[in-house]
């Protein structure tokens, strides 16, 4: 069974641009969560989706948004990029997403110049 | 953000020794806890989990201990191997219909051959 797949693996953008990251969960998993990882702040929760509905959202500005499609695949978007948005963005999936282990992808490393 | 990661503690052990990694969690209402291992360039990998109605759980070479009285979680790795070298994160989930995880700062485990 394939794991969580995130594309692209690396991305370089400039300030002010926007970016879309993609995540394909493990087959059969209906819950997708996104996390941001930086050396200074560690792993921080961005948002969580289940059956195309956002179930929970972290403390990030409105420039960060996401969505989930009917096939459970998910995308997150960051608009008007800032230097501080440089981070590893991790996607994780689980069956229903309540009290279950999350399986993480390898992440998308975003660099904002 | 909710995760503070300004300093990464390091645990250095000899190959073959047992390792104990500790974690203090923040929310006494958390009902689910997970340990993850993260190697360089990869996403977090699930190691073991435990629910709040348990105080100990064992896996292959790993044991997790939960002390709810002092809000403390520990991961014990038996016969530590060079391949165990990585950053280890504990994570907690609050009650309710969500799988949002709050991650600890992480501990770098360095195994000396």
Image (cartoon, coloured by chain):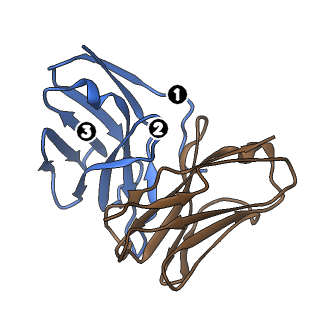
Chain colours: A brown, B blue
Q: Tell me if mark 3 has few (under 14), some (14-19) or many (20+) residues whose alpha carbon lies within 10 angstroms of its own.
A: some
State the residue position of label 2.
B105
Residue contact at pointers 1 and 3, CB within 8 angstroms = no
User: Does label 1 or label 3 sit earlier along the sequence?
Assistant: 1
- Residue at figure coordinates x 48%, y 60% from the top left: A5
Residue A55, placed above or below residue B86: below
Q: Tell me the subunit letter for badge 2.
A: B
Residue B7 numbered tag:
1
**Which percent across, then down, holds residue A35?**
54, 55
Q: Quadrant of the N terminus of chain A?
A: bottom left
Marks 1/2 in contact by CB < 8 Å: the verdict is: yes
- State which tag comes first along the sequence, 3 or 2: 3
Of B94 and B85, nearer the camera is B85
Residue in the foreground of this view, choosing between B89 and A14: A14
User: What kind of element bears circle 1?
Assistant: loop
| Residue A75: x %, y % from top left | 61, 69
Secondary structure found at label 3: strand
Which of B26 and A86 lies nearest the eye of the viewer? A86
Q: Residue at x 26, y 17 (%)?
A: B13
Taking the spot 25% from the left edge, 39% from the top edge, the residue there is B74
Marks 1 and 3, Cα distance to the nearest angstrom? 19 Å
> Residue pushed farthest right?
A16
- Residue with the mark numbered 3: B74
Q: Are marks 1 and 2 on the same chain?
A: yes
Query: What is the quadrant of residue B38 in the picture?
Result: top left
Instruction: Check if mark 1 and mark 3 are on a common chain.
Output: yes
* Distance Cα–Cα, label 3 vs label 2: 14 Å
């Amino acid at each position: 069974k394939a794991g969580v797949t995130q594309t692209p693996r690396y991305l370089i953008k400039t300030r002010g641009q926007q970016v879309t990251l993609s995540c394909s969960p493990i087959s059969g998993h209906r819950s997708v969560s996104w996390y941001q990882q930086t050396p200074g702040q560690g792993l921080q929760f961005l948002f969580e989706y289940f059956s195309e509905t956002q179930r929970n959202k972290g403390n990030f500005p409105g420039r960060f948004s996401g969505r989930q499609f009917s096939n459970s695949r998910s995308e997150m978007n960051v608009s008007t990029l800032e230097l501080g948005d440089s981070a590893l963005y991790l996607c994780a999936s689980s069956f229903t997403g309540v009290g279950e282990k999350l399986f993480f992808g390898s992440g998308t490393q975003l660099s904002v110049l | 953000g909710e995760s503070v990661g300004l300093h990464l503690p390091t645990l250095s052990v000899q190959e073959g020794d047992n390792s104990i990694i500790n974690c203090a969690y923040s929310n006494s209402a958390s009902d689910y806890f997970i340990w993850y291992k993260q190697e360089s360039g990869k996403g977090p990998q699930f190691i073991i989990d435990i629910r709040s109605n348990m105080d100990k759980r064992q896996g292959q070479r790993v044991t997790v201990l939960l002390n709810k009285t002092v809000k403390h979680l520990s991961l014990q790795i038996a016969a530590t191997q060079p391949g165990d070298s990585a950053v280890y994160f504990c994570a907690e989930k609050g009650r309710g219909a969500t799988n949002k995880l709050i991650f600890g700062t992480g501990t770098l485990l360095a195994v000396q051959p």
